[in-house]
Image (cartoon, rainbow, N blue to C red):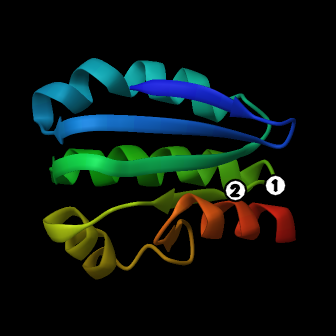
């Protein structure tokens, strides 16, 4: 997992590989620490993720609730294949916006 500031209003979190139970368990605390208290919009890049378990979805949702409660947005982008399908069927679009690429994600945060 990599975290990068995108100006003053957003942070990008990039995941790599598989977000299976073991990986989520290893990265969830750091993800939460980076996201929950950052006071900015959060862009989550899943373009390099080949698999996401239900625990990954739970991690995104629980952190998105905190981000939204604090007046910001969480936008997920780059999810393809099975990961994209899982997110599409999860019905979380009221809480987490899901877009194709970073340009679209940045446009959503700029409009907030």
State which quarter of the image contains the N terminus. Answer: top left
Q: Is residue 67 left or right of residue 18?
A: right
Q: Residues within 10 Å of mark 2 (few under 14, many from 20)?
A: some
Residue positioned 21% across, 62% down in the render? 83
Report the front residue among 68 and 101.
101
Report the front residue among 34 and 6.
6
Secondary structure category for the residue under label 2:
helix
State which quarter of the image contains the C terminus. Answer: bottom right
Secondary structure category for the residue under label 1:
loop
Residue positioned 46% across, 71% down in the render? 100
Residue 35 appears in which quarter of the rendering?
Answer: top right
For the residues labelled 1 and 2, say whether their Cβ atoms are less than 8 Å apart: yes
Which label sits on residue 107? Answer: none
Compared to residue 93, the image places residue 64 above or below, namely: above
Visible residue check, residue 112: no
Residue positioned 50% across, 72% down in the render? 99
Q: Is residue 68 left or right of residue 65?
A: right
Which label sits on residue 71? Answer: 1
The tally of labels here is: 2
Compared to residue 67, the image places residue 18 above or below, namely: above
**Cα distance between the residues tagged 1 and 2:** 5 Å
Q: Is residue 112 left or right of residue 18?
A: right
Q: Position of residue 55 (x, y in %)?
A: 22, 45
Q: Position of residue 95 (x, y in %)?
A: 56, 68
Q: Position of residue 61 (x, y in %)?
A: 44, 54
Compared to residue 16, the image places residue 102 above or below, namely: below
Residue positioned 19% across, 37% down in the render? 17
Q: Position of residue 84 (x, y in %)?
A: 27, 69
What residue does disc 2 label? 68
Q: Residues within 10 Å of mark 1 (few under 14, many from 20)?
A: few
């Amino acid at each position: 997992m990599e975290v990068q500031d995108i100006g003053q209003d957003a942070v990008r979190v990039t995941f790599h590989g598989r977000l299976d139970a073991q990986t989520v368990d290893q990265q969830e605390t750091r993800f939460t620490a980076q996201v929950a208290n950052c006071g900015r919009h959060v862009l989550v890049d899943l373009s390099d993720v080949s698999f996401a378990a239900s625990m990954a979805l739970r991690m995104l949702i629980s952190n998105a609730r905190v981000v939204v409660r604090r007046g910001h947005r969480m936008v997920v982008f780059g999810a393809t294949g099975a990961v994209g399908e899982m997110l599409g069927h999860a019905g979380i679009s009221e809480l987490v916006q899901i877009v194709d690429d970073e340009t679209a994600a940045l446009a959503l945060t700029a409009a907030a």
